[in-house]
Image: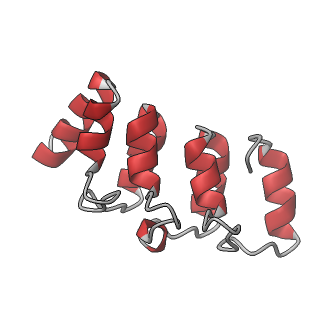
Amino acid sequence: MQNGHEAVVVALLESGADIIQALVNGSMPLFMAVQNNHEAVLATLLKAGADVLMSNSRRKDGCTPLCIAAAQGHEAVLMMLLKAGAQMTATDDGRTPLMAAMNEGHRSVGAALRLWIAGTRT
């Protein structure tokens, strides 16, 4: 997942890999796809049933997938998570996705989040 090899992810899923198996730090495959900005892998995981709501449960360091995408400026990944049902209210230790984007200087992500909140972006 970490290196973005979609074909490997597909093969693992087809052989019965656990889509929610977490690493020691609490990262699930969904987290790794988000953190590394792997859109194709994220799409594969979502299609296979990865639950963005369950993934709102924090990693051991408090991060949520949506806040990770926002903080790292991964706009396409962020929009994929929102369209899959990720919650804007999920926070990283009190920091919302919008705050994360703006604190890291990702103005376009902040603008996309504001449009999503206003209901004008789908």
Q: Using the image as rendered, state which of residue 83 and residue 73 is in the foreground.
A: 73
Quadrant in the picture for the C terminus: top left
Query: In the image, 110: left or right of 34?
Result: left
Please provide percent x and percent y for residue 92.
Answer: 35, 57
**Number of numbered discs:** 0
Please provide percent x and percent y for residue 66.
Answer: 40, 52
Report if residue 29 is visible in the image: yes
Q: Compared to 13, does 104 lie above or below?
A: above
Q: Using the image as rendered, state which of residue 24 and residue 36 is in the foreground.
A: 24
Colour mapping used in the image: secondary structure
- The residue sitting at 40% across, 38% down in the picture is 71
Please provide percent x and percent y for residue 16.
Answer: 83, 76
Q: Quadrant of residue 111?
A: top left
Q: Compared to 99, does 20 lie above or below?
A: below
Query: In the image, 60: left or right of 120?
Result: right
- The residue sitting at 65% across, 42% down in the picture is 40
- The residue sitting at 80% across, 57% down in the picture is 10
Q: Quadrant of residue 105?
A: top left
- The residue sitting at 62% across, 40% down in the picture is 36
Q: Using the image as rendered, state which of residue 64 and residue 10 is in the foreground.
A: 64
- Residue, far left: 118
Please provide percent x and percent y for residue 84.
Answer: 42, 59
Query: In the image, 85: left or right of 102?
Result: right
